[in-house]
Image (cartoon, rainbow, N blue to C red):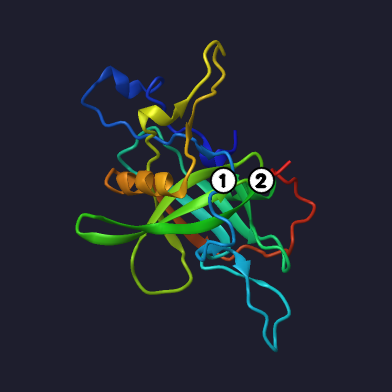
Amino acid sequence: MRRLLVLVMMLIASPALAQDEEYVFEAERIHAPVPLYTFDWEQVWPRGMVPDADTLAGCASRVAFGDWRFTPNPEDEYADPWWLRVSNYGAFHCAANLLAADEREELEEGDFSRGLFAMIGEGRADGRAWELWVIQEGFVPGSDYVLLAREVEGGDLLRRFTVLQRRCPRGRVREADGMDVWTTRYCAVESRAELLALARRMLREKPLGTLEWVEDANEKGPDAEAPDPSY
């Protein structure tokens, strides 16, 4: 299973179940049968730049390329940190190459996928306004989603997100019986409105942690040789 969307803690397996009063952090795998956000959505990144006298083609992004570190919520004693490397696919076809690993020095051989970042709407929590974002990972068959948020503030290039929990509404859980120990459970979403409503609910829960840009990674250009999760 791709590292970005590993189920951090399932209710059926969590040691916290032994104590009803203990808070349980959840990170269900969220999946849509087709990508919910395409380049018709204005806040999808990276995306193609408008050609001008100095530029024939290229990709622009509000999300910084480079290495990002996930730091778990200190209240979640079962979560571990991990790293994510974000790079641009190429000049003519825009997408984010994503490499994830437990340690930074392992990123070159990390779990590969390709996707997009998207700002999907806004929400309010604790009297503050937040932008709601997702990492839309993979294109075929459909996409998986990591829920993110950032406080509404200035600055065009984003270098820090709060990572939200992913608690699946009971009616959207999909799971096969009779599969022994093999996990089949995921959270099915089929519309932008449904995903936005879930993100707004998760904004009011304790976050999973933070995802923060650390420093520039060595940009090596289009990753045409990397395996494509679309197939």
Farthest residue in the bottom direction?
53
Q: Which residue is mark 1?
A: 103
In the shown orientation, is residue 114 left or right of residue 13?
right
Q: Quadrant of residue 86?
A: bottom right
Q: Say whether disc 1 or disc 2 marks the residue closer to the N-terminus.
A: 1
Residue found 56% across the figure and 68% down from its top: 61
- Circles 1 and 2, Cβ within 8 Å, touching? The answer is no
The numbered mark at residue 112 is 2
In screen coordinates, is 207 left or right of 174? left
Apparent side of residue 123 relative to residue 158 in the rendered image (left or right): left
Q: Quadrant of the image for the C terminus?
A: top right
Q: Position of residue 116 (x, y in %)?
A: 58, 55
Residue 42 vertical placement versus 142 (above, below): below
- Mark nearest the camera among 1 and 2 is 2
Does residue 178 sit above or below 160 in this rendering?
above
Residue 147 picture location, percent across and down: 43, 48
Query: Label for residue 84?
Result: none
Residue 207 shows in this picture: no
Q: Observer-nearest residue: 74 or 32?
A: 32
Quadrant where the N terminus sits is top right
Q: Residue at x 59, y 46 (%)?
A: 100
Residue at 58 percent across and 47 percent down: it is 35
**Is 125 above or below relative to 165?**
below
Of 223 and 81, which appears nearest the observer?
223
